Image: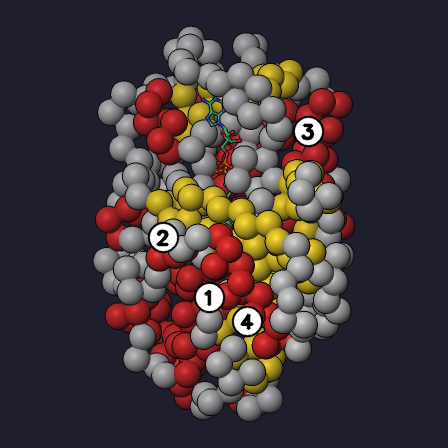
Amino acid sequence: MSSVHVIGAGLAGLAAACQLTDAGRHVVLHDSAKAAGGRARSYFDKAMGCRIDNGNHLLLSGNTAALVYLRRIGARHSLAGPSEPIFPFVDLPSGNHWTLRLNQTGFPWWVFSAKRRVPGTRFYDYRALLKLREAGPDDLVASVLGNIGPLYRNLIEPLAISALNTMPDIASAAPLRVVLAETIERGGAASLPRFAKIGLSESFVDPALEWLRNKGTTIKFGRRVTEIDPNQPTILAVPPWVAASMVPGLVVPDKFEAICNLHFKYSLDPGEAGFWGLIGGMAEWVFARPNILSVTISAANRYLAIDNDTIAAKVWAELAGAFGLKPKMPQCRVVWEKRATFMSTPEQLARRPQTRTKSSNLVLAGDWTDTGLPATIEGAIRSGNAAASVLLQTQES
Ligand SMILES: Cc1cc2nc3c(=O)[nH]c(=O)nc-3n(C[C@H](O)[C@H](O)[C@H](O)COP(=O)(O)OP(=O)(O)OC[C@H]3O[C@@H](n4cnc5c(N)ncnc54)[C@H](O)[C@@H]3O)c2cc1C
């Protein structure tokens, strides 16, 4: 049986390669970069003198494909996170700290407790979330939920911006509905926040490469693939613009949103959860890593015109105010991913292609294919699994 070529060793390509290998196929894994991981990777930053992730990545325990992938590659215990489904927040303008405390069981008892739910909300406010279930592909997050007061400002808006990487006034409600249905609606056990204990590569990438190498995968990194051999079974797991350049007539998402991450050399007590959501400022999520305080700003096209020093000074001032830190900013690295994900607008979602192509030898993978999920680790891994399954089926028939 001929080898399967997997082009792109981001999480979609790695997941596909693992699934194919498990099914007994020999895989040749290609990536143009010298290292795997794509948009979810760790690297040594010379100026900071330590390893950092390109950006903070948060998962939830309802991200089942991601957890199965980690188990397969022997990295199930490489994630950290609180034992309870809690989400600490800081309201930056008021300095108020509060924590959303879901309960572990399926029924959302937490909405009946003022100490557990979002401050300023009443339990019946949460019924408005049911409106999401009726949202069609063209409905926008802000038009479906924007009028529900503090629940929107303090929870739905930050959740939507981070999950969809798109501002809620232009973001489709449909992928947010899927995320909530697979996590918060299933209860606290599916909503435990999870992040890489050491780094993204240590969790998602290096163990996968070792697993694949041990099973005989041929790995070819540092060389850009520009053509697909129509006679070789291939999974194309590259970014959408690269896929479009290789597959004539392929329609793909073509508008993108940036994510900006700021890594400050600073040690902060990680508190109950290891991270906080920040509301009402520029900084949106902050993760207290060993010796690094890492901040994420999603849907960051709106800040592209601002220089890094100004962003860093503003974000540090916000952190200093929120956590009582000294005003003098420590060493900082600002990392922009300008095409972090496609824009989750109805128009862009309609451009997501299916896994199958016209050729039975070529299938597509990537967080931008039509997974129904936003562009996330879970979506990327599911797309890789789906691509491997489709290729195996078409090869057998
Ligand atoms: C800063 C940031 C923060 C994020 N935060 C989160 C989060 O909190 N939670 C979450 O779930 N998701 C998050 N995401 C999204 C997540 O990282 C992506 O959905 C996922 O990594 C996409 O994986 P992929 O394999 O589809 O694509 P990619 O990672 O883009 O992989 C594509 C691969 O193809 C390779 N390639 C490109 N061209 C060629 C070529 N010609 N030949 C060979 N190889 C090629 C690239 O080098 C790359 O390795 C975040 C993304 C970013 C950038």
Q: In front: 20, or 234? A: 234
- Give the total number of marks visible in the rendering: 4
Determine the secondary structure under disc 3: helix
Quadrant in which the C terminus appears:
top left
Q: Is residue 249 left or right of residue 331?
A: left
Disc on res. 209: 3
> Cα distance, mark 3 to mark 1?
36 Å
Q: Colour scheme used in the picture?
A: secondary structure
Mark 3 or 2 closer to N-term?
3
Mark 1 or 2 closer to N-term?
1
Residue at 60% in and 30% down: 36
Kind of residue at disc 1: Met
Mark 1 or 4 closer to N-term?
1
The percent position of residue 391, horizontal first and vertical second, equals 47, 24
The percent position of residue 75, horizontal first and vertical second, equals 73, 43
Kind of residue at disc 4: Glu
Q: Residues within 10 Å of mark 4 (few under 14, many from 20)?
A: many
Q: Residues within 10 Å of mark 3 (few under 14, many from 20)?
A: many
Q: Are marks 3 and 1 in contact (CB under 8 Å)?
A: no
Figure check: 325 above or below 382: below
Disc on res. 305: 2
Disc on res. 318: 4
> Cα distance, mark 3 to mark 4?
39 Å
Q: Quadrant of residue 298?
A: bottom left
The reply to whether residue 112 is visible in this rendering is yes
